Image (spheres, rainbow, N blue to C red):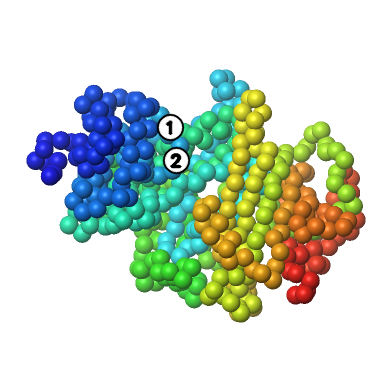
Amino acid sequence: MSSKNSGLSPLGALAIGMGGMGAVALGAYVMNGWIKGDLNYKIEKAVQAAMREQLTSLKGEAKDQIIHALLTPQFARQPSALQMSSLSRLPTLHQTQSAPPIVDSSDEKSGHNKKVYKLVLTGGPCAGKSTALARVKGFLQSRGYFVATVAEAANFLHQNGVTYYPKEPLMFQRAVTSIQRDHEERIFKYCEEIAMHKDCTVFIYKIYDGRSYCDEEAWMTVLRDVGLPLSEEALRSRYDAIFHLVTAADGAEKYYTKMSDGKMVRHEEPAQAVALDKNLQSAWAGHPKHFILKNTGTFDDKINNLVSGICSVLGIVATKRKAAKFLLLSLPKSFPASGLHNMSTSIFTKTYVRMPDNQGKDSVVMFVRERYQTNFRVTEDKKDLEIRSYILKTIRTEDNQNIEEIRTLSLREYKGYLSFADSDRVVVRQKRVQFTFDDKFYEIVEYLKPVKTPRLLLLNVHQSQEDVEPMKAKDVPDFIPVEREVTKEREYSAHYLSMKLTKK
């Protein structure tokens, strides 16, 4: 049974392959001529529900038929709501006919001075993109930004069993590009609504990177098939800035690896990685804000340079990563009426874990962390938007140097790591009030766990990168009651406080 023999479009073939509710919903969609118009909300919901329910259970010819339908050029030109994005867990949004522009919400209609910043994070294999993204996301969230990310479409396809097909070399690239476009537009549309009340940053994983995998003629064919502009300038102008992290194979060769978390995640030899990296740099070379972050100094230096570049685009103060730490007498009784910006309150829960392959390795420290932002208000009636995010942080000591890796986790992954909680440590829970004042970033930390008497209150201060003199207790604003500086006292670190008394 094939779409060719039956005379059906790929959408019709998809309906028959799915059967049941999928056939009813998709059949109605095709026969009623809604292909060129906006989606009917109920039909879209029915299609999405059926696809999620049916696709994973299908086998053999039926599943192959669905995959073929999803990847054909004809399907790629159908409305985006039915392209593979319906398999993702993104919120349902109305279809857009073209990529929305960068929105500056300071117009007369909105009455707000907010913006959605669309930033691309790209780079060659083993460049540190995952760690960089997690680090930057935390940095911006603590500065009051709503941060959304668009995952890499190629990984999405691989995770769902769709791989490169040698007999149709452009089929996979066409699928990658169309899915990346759809996910970008849907998430960006969502952020436009948030930006009516809050600054937003969207990090994009490389829709234009496909250019480095194709010759010019093939790339034009892909763009034409998925309905994107053929002009390279038009494609690049979709984004505010491009941040390219150079592969470790170019300048940090001893850190280049094909493995991550004990799994083979890349296949390029170092020379291939360098060549691919150069191609990616060339693909984005015409963008007016194209930042190339090389492997000069340490990896921390590379990430700090990335943060500085992002701050310059967003127009915010770039601060030093290492903080001065102070013991507080009490919480502030009040805050200044002016001069204080982007205040937020979050609950951080840190759980140290010990994986089976790291047993007995004191040189490896791992923990998972939940960030629960409790007062992120975006609506006129002041209801809170609940924001939870999860990371895994691994710190390895090699050659007397600490090497950090940070990876963003899903809720399911986070719960999975909790089952490996280190029995020699207790869970650390903190309430953090964060704000910017006088070009410095302040973080008031109240320890909720472990419970201390009197309660433990700390202040972290990240100075501007322009500051030369280190922060002292006398420099802390008067509204924060400081007892003394404890920057170099390890007893006030979360790592030390998590250890049970028998291990201290």
Q: Which residue is mark 1?
A: 93
- Left/right placement of residue 241 relative to residue 450 reads left
- Left/right placement of residue 104 relative to residue 10 reads right
User: Pointer 1 and pointer 2: residues touching (CB < 8 Å)?
Assistant: yes
* Residue drawn at 39 percent across, 72 percent down: 270
* Residue drawn at 49 percent across, 76 percent down: 254
Residue in the foreground of this view, choosing between 46 and 335: 46
Residue in the foreground of this view, choosing between 415 and 98: 415
Looking at this view, name the residue that lies furthest to the left.
5
Residue in the foreground of this view, choosing between 233 and 209: 209
Secondary structure at badge 2 equals: loop
Q: Is residue 118 visible?
A: yes
Q: Is residue 306 visible?
A: no
Cα distance in 3D space between marks 1 and 2: 9 Å
Q: Is residue 256 above or below residue 483?
A: below
Give percent across and percent down for residue 353. Answer: 61, 66
User: Label 2: how many residues lie within 10 Å, few (<14), some (14-19) or many (20+)?
Assistant: few
* Residue drawn at 32 percent across, 50 percent down: 56
Number of dots carrying numbers: 2
Q: Which residue is mark 2?
A: 90
Amino acid tagged 2: Leu
